[in-house]
Image (spheres, rainbow, N blue to C red):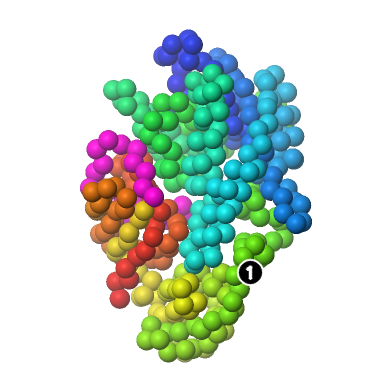
Amino acid sequence: MITKISDKNIMNKKVLVAMSGGVDSSIAAYLLLKDGYDVVGVTMCLGVKSDNIYESKCCGMSAIEDAKKVARHLNIPHYVLDFSREMEEFVIRNFVSRYSIAMTPNPCVECNKHLKFKKLMDYARQMGFFYLATGHYAAISEENNNFFLKRPKDAKKDQTYFLYCVKKEYLKNILFPLADYTKNEVREIAEKNNIPVAFKAESQDVCFIPDGTSYKDFVIARTGAAIEGDIVDLNGKILGRHKGIINYTLGQRTGLGISAGTPIYVVKIDHETNVVIVGGKESLYSKELVAGSLNFLVDNFPMEVFAKIRYGSKSARASVFIEEDNARARVVFDEPQLSITPGQSIVFYDGDKVVGGGIIEKFFPTK
């Protein structure tokens, strides 16, 4: 739900809208403008350069041009900020280093944490904007002058999983104009109002990896992390050779080059010994994990929550035990979860509210 200007001091009407050149952020700007806000668009240039220069698929030159077209159509100012250095420092290096130690990072979480809702938020404040708005499918509610991150109307597009890392104190200055809309409704608004990107397709890939390049090749090109090693069973028996741990993921069944008579899966990857461990599917289930890099979005964190271990998974009931220094949390699920993956985020919900989250560091197999 968009905070109405009439509900706030008239001086709080200035909003900086992060425009990626896609339909969602474009309609976010349109809705705010329609509601009477003083809207300015900004695009973060995240273009990445290496030995072979290429363009980031998100917020590269073509995306910037699309955002400019929308801004002209809406008759609002539009600016471009070069965040390529921050993209490299906080997102890409994290992506590469995590994969190199057999973890599976989520670059969208890191981008939101360090770029959109830190660097860009700080810029907005410095330039006199009270609000920063994005085209995320999420909601913010106010209760007794406390602000909460909540699930949006469109459950299928819910992006709160990627937003748990936003600092609690920022919530009062964030607007999510698409909170009460479905994706189909957003498309309809774009078509009806002749928004230039109304029919633009969504990008599904990691934005900084060039088309035609796999994430494995991207990491290997930067690290050389493709050293062969042993594939072993749970008892340590050598069953074969792997082509570098970067080429394997937890739960992987195909491409192992092993004939075991029964289905086997990657159940653990030990980067210190350069060993890939395989076993039956039962070894992929776990009821307990440890998470770090915690962020809390409520003052009174509930012990009983619903937790998501990846974006596409369903929420599952769990108990959370937080260390005294708030550095880590032990999470115990009511029911075993399949393929809990170190490096991925775990996000905690209390009803529709996001109460916090963290990065999965390790899990404990049930068998």
- The quarter of the picture where residue 262 lies is bottom left
In the image, which residues are magenta?
Answer: 293-317
Does 115 appear above or below 249? above
Q: Which quadrant holds the C terminus?
A: bottom left
The answer to whether residue 246 of the structure is visible from this angle is: yes
Tell me residue 38's x, y (percent): 58, 16
- Residue wearing tag 1: 224
Residue at position x 48%, y 10% from top? 10
Tell me residue 216's x, y (percent): 62, 65
In the image, 70 versus 192, the foreground residue is 70
Does 316 appear above or below 31? below
**Extreme-right residue of the structure:** 52
Residue at position x 55%, y 56% from top? 95
Mark 1 Cα shell of 10 Å, populated few (<14), some (14-19), many (≥20) = few
Residue 325 falls left or right of residue 230: left
Residue 294 within the magenta-colored segment of the rendering:
yes
Q: Quick one: SS at disc 1?
A: loop
In the image, 184 versus 79, the foreground residue is 79
Q: Which quadrant holds the N terminus?
A: top left
Tell me residue 24's x, y (percent): 59, 35
The answer to whether residue 153 of the structure is visible from this angle is: no
Say which amino acid is labelled 1.
Gly
Residue at position x 53%, y 54% from top? 94
Tell me residue 136's x, y (percent): 52, 37
In the image, 221 versus 18, the foreground residue is 221
- The quarter of the picture where residue 166 lies is top left
